[in-house]
Amino acid sequence: AGRISIGKSPMLAINKGLQRYSPLAGDLLANSILPGNAMTGSGWCIFVYNLAPETEENVLWQLFGPFGAVQSVKVIRDLQTSKCKGFGFVTMTNYDEAVVAIQSLNGYTLGNRVLQVSFKTNKTKTA
């Protein structure tokens, strides 16, 4: 019988969307983090890694804004060059919105870099 052909681009976009919003990913995420470590005052701190040197704060506001209320954004910069050191932090008001943002943006390609996004964890020093 007749076959309907769908181009590769829409299917790849659909597959990526399904992976980003997979309910299983949420269960894995919830079991692999300690959200108490990410709680900062009145918000949830998200660590964003693999940012390009030219990344500005407004990029992170635009990236995370669609997922919910963003309280603050901080791109960590080299003191001498003022270029991004490759990471930053986003604080979101609502835990559930922060989880969806992490699920959606972890593995997201920004420019030519694949972002790593997770709740901030406390650094532990070893002797």
Image (cartoon, grey):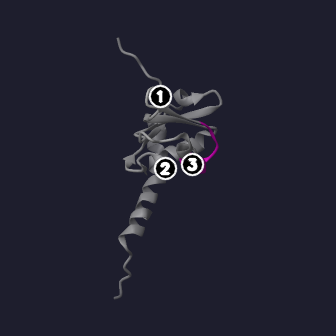
Whole-angstrom CA distance, mark 3 to mark 2, is 14 Å
Q: Secondary structure at mark 1?
A: loop
Whole-angstrom CA distance, mark 1 to mark 2, is 19 Å
Question: Horizontal and vertical percent for residue 52?
Answer: 41, 42
Crowd class of label 3 (few under 14; some 14 to 19; many from 20; radius 10 Å): few
Crowd class of label 1 (few under 14; some 14 to 19; many from 20; radius 10 Å): some
The quadrant of the picture occupied by the C terminus is top left
Q: Which image quarter: residue 15?
A: bottom left
Residue carrying label 3: 62
Residue 104: which numbered mark, if any?
2
Whole-angstrom CA distance, mark 3 to mark 1, is 24 Å
Does residue 68 appear to the left or right of 32 in the view shown? right
Residue carrying label 1: 121
- Magenta segment, which residues? 63-72
- Tag 3: amino acid: Gln
Q: Earlier in the sequence, mark 3 or mark 1?
A: 3
The residue mark sitting in front, 3 or 2, is 3
**Is residue 29 inside the magenta stretch?**
no
- Tag 2: amino acid: Ser
